[in-house]
Amino acid sequence: MRTLEETRPKMDCDNCKEEVKHLKGAVLNNTFGFYCTPCLSGESRQAGAHQASEIRTSDRDAHQRDIIQPYKPDGTPNSEFISEYPDQAKDYFSQEQLEKYA
């Protein structure tokens, strides 16, 4: 005899499209649907094509200060780098440059 668990049909999560047995109806990213537990808890980073752009944008906004370079393309010190990373700026620039571009 098969258990209820074995007979339960599998369905696709509306967010990650993974086939799972347990889905919960909820609103995720302003859209009502049926989602798996990892998607609802934020553990999953998988997304459909329509959400990939939104994820990249939110990642870029959240980590934008991590990609600031010490020098601008023209070779001058980047004042944004100096203000965001004052301790590391000392390794790149002289005291005169720090005072001039800060």
Image (cartoon, grey):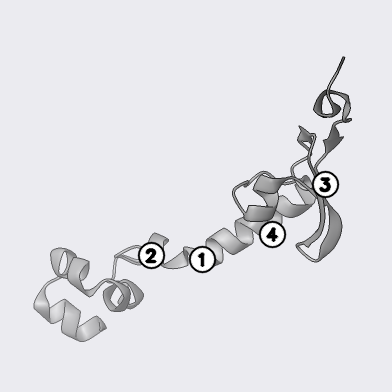
Closer-to-camera residue (50/43): 43
Q: Position of residue 62 (x, y in %)?
A: 51, 66
Where disc 3 sits, the SS reads loop
Q: Which residue is disc 1 drawn over?
A: 62
Q: Which residue is disc 2 drawn over?
A: 68
Closer-to-camera residue (12/97): 12
Q: Earlier in the sequence, mark 1 or mark 2?
A: 1
The amino acid pointed to by label 4 is: Glu
The structure residue drawn at horizontal position 77% and vertical position 34%, both measured from the top left corner, is 20
Measured Cα–Cα span from mark 4 to mark 1: 12 Å
Q: Earlier in the sequence, mark 2 or mark 4?
A: 4
The amino acid pointed to by label 3 is: Asp
Q: Nearer the viewer, mark 3 or mark 4?
A: 3
Measured Cα–Cα span from mark 3 to mark 1: 25 Å
Closer-to-camera residue (36/59): 36
Q: Which residue is disc 4 drawn over?
A: 54
The structure residue drawn at horizontal position 18% and vertical position 79%, both measured from the top left corner, is 98
Numbered circle sitting on residue 14:
3
The residue positioned farthest toward the left in the image shown: 95
Q: Is residue 24 above or below residue 4?
A: below
Q: Earlier in the sequence, mark 4 or mark 1?
A: 4
